[in-house]
Image: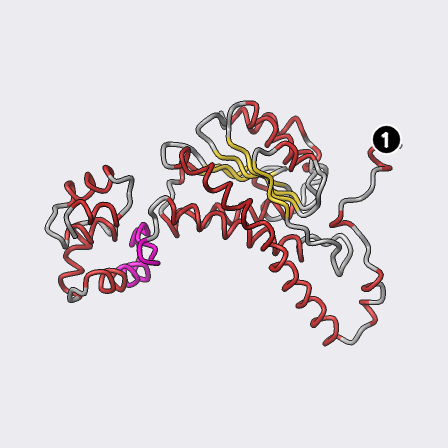
Amino acid sequence: MKGSDHAPPAATEGISPRFRDLDRWPPGEVLQTLWESQLAAVAAVHAALPAIAAAVDAALPRLAGDGRLVYAGAGTSGRIGVQDGAELPPTFDWPADRLVLLMAGGAAAFTRSIENAEDDRAAAESDVAAHAIGPDDVVIGIAASGSTPYTTTVVAQSARRGALTIGIANSPGGALLSAAAHPVLIETGAEAIAGSTRMKAGTAQKVVLNLFSSLLMVRLGRIHRGLMVDMNARNAKLRGRALRMLRELTGQDDDTLRVALDAADGRVKTAVLVLHGLDRAAAESLLARHGGHLHAALAGLGK
């Protein structure tokens, strides 16, 4: 056998004596236990809050410019990364061309398991090169074990090319946390169903990514007074939401708000400035001068 076959298993692969007879418990007791494990997963994130905040601080200068946000992972961890990234354009109008989703096994692995893909270091190197990941980019690698070869290779190669790297893992001591400039450890321990990291580990990863990307978008000015003001009203549901936001922010009647929203091409921040007397071009120029921050743009108007 290879030497690595004798290495101790990752903490997430542990077998807990507490759950040895789980399959013989009454269904209600199983559910109670699984629910409690989910609460424990969320609680485990608390210790990582300083690391998440530091990662956001480091990412800001690159993403306030033209940098891209890159998610990388395999299996459950990769799919959780894909989900977080895919939600950024509709929620915060994050540009699709500034989002890269790297999944071991490619797009087919979004919905099914691809045998041995997580061990393919050559594919990881090829993916990094194909997307020309470089100094402007922020790369987030996610792996429950902290040692998935595909993910650790993406992070290590991206770091060599000058990208800012963030590693999210549920087990200490793995190569991913060592390779990343900003390691984020969430120690969720053994699963109730041994090795099923889609459970506690996956829940904690999703929470960390929710926190990271949401704080990032707040800091980038894509939230104003708790509202998703960078959302673009592209359909009836979102147009109704945009009108509610404008009503909250300006107090104007709906007819006036609709005219402003049309003039702003469905963009809420631009519409707010239109309602303060600017035309669309002037509103967009003012926002650009203030890095997209509506508070600063309004202050520039003396509002």
**Quadrant in the rendering for residue 196:** bottom right
Q: Residue 247: x, y in percent? A: 22, 64
Q: Please give the name of the residue rendered at 36% of the width and 33% of the height, measured from the top-left corner.
A: 65
Does the magenta segment cover residue 240?
yes
Quarter of the image containing the N terminus?
A: top right
| Residue topped by disc 1 | 2
Assign the magenta stretch its main secondary structure: loop
What amino acid does circle 1 point to? Lys
Q: Residue 126: x, y in percent? A: 59, 25
Q: Looking at the image, which residue sits at the far left?
A: 277
- Front in this rendered view, residue 200 or 234: 200
Q: Please give the name of the residue rendered at 68% of the width and 63% of the height, measured from the top-left corner.
A: 37
* Mark 1, other Cα within 10 Å: few <14 / some 14–19 / many ≥20: few
| Count of numbered tags | 1
Does the magenta segment cover residue 150?
no
Is 192 left, or right, of 65 in this rendering?
right
